[in-house]
Amino acid sequence: MAENIATPTAAAVIELRGVGKIFRTASQSDRAVLEGVDLTLREGEIVAMLGKSGSGKSTLLRIMAGLVGADRGEVRFRGQRLAGTAEGIAMVFQSFALFPWLTVQQNVELGLEAQGVPRAERERRAEAAIDMIGLAGFNSALPRELSGGMRQRVGIARALVTEPDLLLMDEAFSALDVLTGETLRDEMLALWQSGRANIRSILIVSHNIEEAVMMADRIVILSSDPGRIRAEVPVALPRPRNRDSAQVRVLVDQIYALMTAPAAEARRPAPAREIGYRLPDADISQMEAILDLLCEAPFQGRADLPHLADEAGLTDDELLPACEALQLVQLVSIEAGDIAATDAGRAYYAAGPQQRKAIFGRQLLANVALAAHVRRELVASEAGEIGEEQVLEELEQSLKPAEAERVLSVAIGWGRYGEIFEYSYHSGMLTLPEDEGAGHGA
Ligand SMILES: Nc1ncnc2c1ncn2[C@@H]1O[C@H](COP(=O)(O)OP(=O)(O)OP(=O)(O)O)[C@@H](O)[C@H]1O
Ligand SMILES: [Mg+2]
């Protein structure tokens, strides 16, 4: 069966337009919990939703499941206006919500009973779902005889048995211990990729940024009071994903920054404020190629990141670090999956080679602490030079030796290009650029 792959033009599974929800509090004053939520889930995609506690994630999921109505806007499922629960939408909750007096098999069949599926078919489909989720042999067990992880498998089987188009998972892995949660999550991904469960789209609500990055094709971040979609981050990484890979770490960092920044600040990237910041492996020519492409027609300075990725013909391994680097030096800003040239970025694009270097050097000093630090040390030194070991030692206070070397070599590449310092591979010495160094300390 075909792998699930979402394309921007894939058919919508569910569409929310201007969805709002108001709760009346005990003091009788109305409180908007959700406001103006626009969200579309397309065929073949997993979307993760992050947001602070109380931001309205569960409420939004319940609206999508048709369990509660929206006060504003509308929800369309498969093109039809959603009014109440619908066949084709299933939900998995954090608390397993199993009936303790029913067996695994009976708990799973419940979902089908509600749909009036005849008994023999119910049995057969429940067995298949139990099998699919790795509980074969436990059909006649009672929930209390199962571990937490197995109970959640029953909860998932109960959703899968209905062969839903849309699966909504509300913190489905967070009540489990870390290892069990990860195992179940990986199995869900394998199941999704195999296409066996026939699910068209999954929405995962999570508190865990890494879980979102590991699972989703796209991450939406909900703001609080009122809850609305504040940012959208595409996760264009191939699967299976390695949680220790640089790309996953970069995204986790970015999303962390987005989620921790006050709303108005959300558009600013996390600056490389500490000298030990893990600068991304991006070379200048890739950064230039992306910025040039971005500033030219048809984009004219602003693009949808995945769209730009297509045009750039760079792999994700190249594109993400280069975009992060451009963002770090603030030649671009990245927000809601859109990349836009900053004023400095536009000036860079318009400039000739020598001027480009000067702009880059300036942006580097203003935004990348390690570059500014090396430069400061050089200016303060008698001879206008320092040994690389001195810098490595400082970096090793927060980074492993190999990582410290990598980060320094990135900074050296950028610093040489921006002509804020020089480096001799021969002696391992960092120096001020020649034309500046001449008058220094001599
Ligand atoms: N039935 C209700 N009546 C009144 N207020 C409600 C009701 N349900 C939820 N709320 C309020 O709406 C807000 C959003 O709740 P919701 O459970 O959707 O948040 P959440 O993002 O899922 O939070 P968490 O991360 O803690 O699960 C909260 O302030 C909650 O107290
Ligand atoms: Mg919740």
Image (cartoon, rainbow, N blue to C red):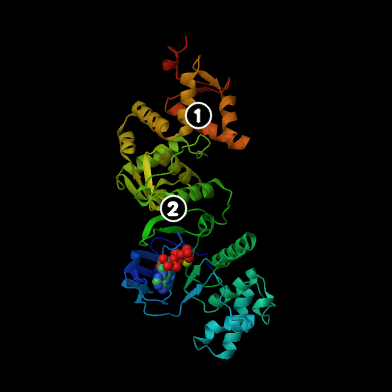
Give the vertical position of 133 relative to 210 (above or below). Answer: below
The residue under the point 38% across, 28% down is: 357
Horizontal relation, residue 348 to residue 254: left or right: left
Horizontal relation, residue 145 to residue 68: left or right: right
Give the vertical position of 81 relative to 268 (above or below). Answer: below
Q: Is residue 18 visible to the viewer in this orientation of the structure?
A: no
Q: How crowded is mark 2: few (under 14 residues within 10 Å), some or many (20 or more)?
A: many
Question: Which-is-in-front pick, marks 1 and 2?
Answer: 2
Give the vertical position of 329 relative to 186 (above or below). Answer: above
Residue type, mark 2 in image: Met
The residue under the point 64% across, 71% down is: 150
The residue identified by callout 1 is 412
Give the vertical position of 105 relative to 322 (above or below). Answer: below
The residue under the point 58% across, 52% down is: 243
Between 303 and 411, the one lying in front of the other is 411
Q: Where is residue 161 in the image (x, y as percent from the top left)?
A: 55, 78
Between 58 and 244, the one lying in front of the other is 58
Q: Quadrant of residue 73?
A: bottom left
Horizontal relation, residue 245 to residue 229: left or right: right
Give SS at disc 1: helix
The residue under the point 41% across, 40% down is: 326
Q: How crowded is mark 1: few (under 14 residues within 10 Å), some or many (20 or more)?
A: many
Q: Distance between the residues labelled 1 and 2?
A: 31 Å
Q: Where is residue 276 in the image (x, y as percent from the top left)?
A: 53, 36
The residue identified by callout 2 is 259
Horizontal relation, residue 378 to residue 18: left or right: right
Give SS at disc 2: helix
Between 25 and 124, the one lying in front of the other is 25
